[in-house]
Image (cartoon, rainbow, N blue to C red):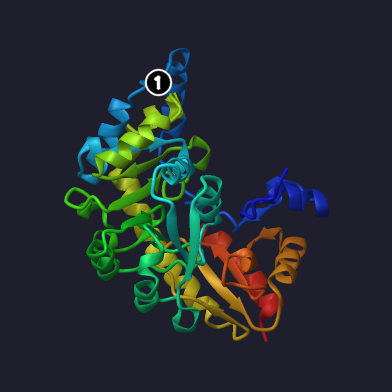
Amino acid sequence: MKELGHGANVEDMCRVYNKNPKDIIDFSSNINPYLIKNLDKYILEGLKECSRYPDINYTTLRLNIAKYLSIESSHVIPGNGATEIIYLLMKNINKRIAILNPTFSEYERGAKLSGLEVLNLYLNKDKDFEINLDDIKDNIDKFDSLFICNPSNPIGKVYDLRKLLELLNKHNKLLIVDETFMEFVEDENKYSLVNYVKDNKNIFIIKAITKFFGIPGIRLGYGICSNKGILDKMYEIKEPWSVNSFADTLSKYIFNDEEYIKNSKEFFIKERAYMLKELEKIHTIKAYETNTNFILIKLFDKKSNELKKELFKQGNILIRDASNFRNLDEKYIRIAIKSHEENKKLLNQLNKILGE
């Protein structure tokens, strides 16, 4: 089986180093470590629905998502995780797509599998990965749509995309934004483009419950767009019943759990400030500012794969070697922000290995 280069390869690492997966703290997978209350109750409710097919039109599911985001349900297309939405979209847009890197590899993979011509553009690494609008302007005639992850994965930085949107609208280009990590942002309403969708047919937003709600195994993602032509084409080729009864049932509860949403957001605001403050004390690294639930780190004196092995062997900790992201190299790692106690264990090990 082909290695796709994502994080969370816990089982493979445990086989190599003869460890029990249950003993490993997985900092390579950047999901919320806390779960909503009564999850087991909701799962059991979904189990009772498994004796029949889900609603093929996902009417209630789309209404639940629409209510959560204060948008129209006709603008929502649900999928088996954000990945299904990405792959469906790639099959139904014009042939030339630009992707802002470094970023999630499935954008490029999905585009190429759909026969798209990919133009790789880059965030400005010399300026802490700012968006280079001049570079996009210079290449504006070489693409029909532009894909950006906001907040960025693996950088963690959130961007104000209004100038970029203005530029693309001027040239009638489609802006595709993966907002999978947007709920972690303190002032998400300032940065999310969800409220722009209704009046702008040149925006397509991808979201999911995977990261913020901490349930990647449920596989529920969704696209948001007011361009009926794009949505209709996606629905034409979308496989029926790709979202299961568990996800359908959970949508009645998770989006309404205001306490969980509030507590999670507050926790990550506080915890990332703590992590960045502590990481700043380690002088052999640079930790980039982050607005989400993970941190990109540049190593000065060690290679990423070396540190990954040492942390795993000595501390039962797995981090993300970020060297396979475009425009990054063997000096970069990414760590998730987990519970406070788990974060302290990581910081302790990093100080042992990297501290002066």
Classify residue 83 as left or right of residue 12. Answer: left
In depth, the one of 78 and 316 nearer the eye is 78
Q: Amino acid at mark 1?
A: Pro
- x, y percent for residue 13: 75, 53
Above/below status of 149 relative to 303: above
- Judge whether residue 256 can be spotted in this image: no
Where on the picture, by quarter, is residue 88?
A: top left
Q: Which residue is mark 1?
A: 54
- Judge whether residue 190 can be spotted in this image: yes
In depth, the one of 35 and 145 nearer the eye is 145
In depth, the one of 24 and 106 nearer the eye is 106
Viewport quadrant of the C terminus: bottom right
Classify residue 351 as left or right of residue 250. Answer: right
Q: Residue at x 43, y 57 (%)?
A: 97
Classify residue 348 as left or right of residue 234. Answer: right
Above/below status of 178 relative to 289: above
- x, y percent for residue 157: 41, 69
Where on the picture, by quarter, is residue 98?
A: bottom left
Neighbourhood count class around disc 1 (C-alpha, 10 Å): few under 14, some 14–19, many 20 upward: some
Q: Residue at x 46, y 23 (%)?
A: 44
The residue positioned farthest toward the left in the image shown: 199
The residue positioned farthest toward the top in the image shown: 51
- x, y percent for residue 160: 29, 69
In depth, the one of 342 and 276 nearer the eye is 276
